[in-house]
Image (cartoon, rainbow, N blue to C red):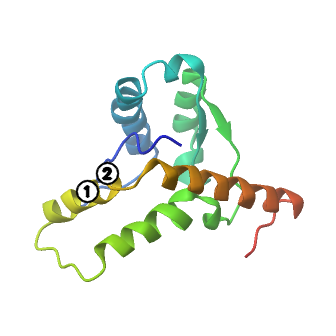
Amino acid sequence: MNGVILHWPVPIDTTINAQYYKKVLQDKLRPATRKKRPGLLESGILFHHENAPVHTARAVTDVLAGYKWELLEHPRYSPDLAPCEFHLFPKMKGHFRGQRFETEEDIIQATKVAIKNLDKCSYVTAFKDWLQRIEKCANNGGCYGE
């Protein structure tokens, strides 16, 4: 709820597989968490990501288990339960509306600015909305629908 810990653009022509995701968790997210949220790694992390095959692969789940991060379940076929999908990406689209980008670097820089411009209340709202969506899903026996 305190904002983005890691903004990591995936290089062009990179295949996102379990090994790549594992490496990002180890080499990017964990160090960024240690730097931006001192003490968080020691106090315990609730970690949520969708249930895409790359996220549920043994190599990834083993790394997360080794970190002792508590994984929050994500119901199948429910991309609308991911805060990025219903909150962050729509806000980013609004920020980018009407702009044209010449290079990949221009897009990366604009994304950094858009993320930086989101206030803390925006993240609090996203997580409150997320909790409501998760509750609705739980109350519907694991099914979610708007």
Q: Looking at the image, do the residues carrying marks 2 and 1 touch, with CB atoms under 8 Å apart?
A: yes
In the image, taking residue 113 as reference, residue 24 lies left or right, namely right
Q: Position of residue 124 (x, y in %)?
A: 56, 49
Mark yes or no: residue 144 visible. yes
Q: Which residue is mark 1?
A: 113
Label 2 neighbourhood size at 10 Å, few (<14), some (14-19), many (20+)?
Answer: few
Placement of the C terminus among the 4 image quadrants: bottom right
Residue at 42% across, 52% down? 119
Q: Position of residue 34 (x, y in %)?
A: 39, 23
Residue at 16% across, 74% down? 101
| Element assignment for label 1 | helix
Q: Position of residue 47 (x, y in %)?
A: 59, 38
Front-lying residue, 84 or 129: 129
Q: In the image, what residue type sits under mark 2? A: Lys
Q: Which residue is mark 2?
A: 116
Front-lying residue, 54 or 122: 122
Q: CA distance from mark 2 to mark 1?
A: 5 Å
Q: Position of residue 85 (x, y in %)?
A: 53, 65
Q: In the image, what residue type sits under mark 1? A: Val
In the image, taking residue 18 as reference, residue 133 lies left or right, namely right
| Element assignment for label 2 | helix
3 in relation to 80, above or below: above
Mark yes or no: residue 52 visible. no
Considering every residue shown, the one lying at the far left of the view is: 102
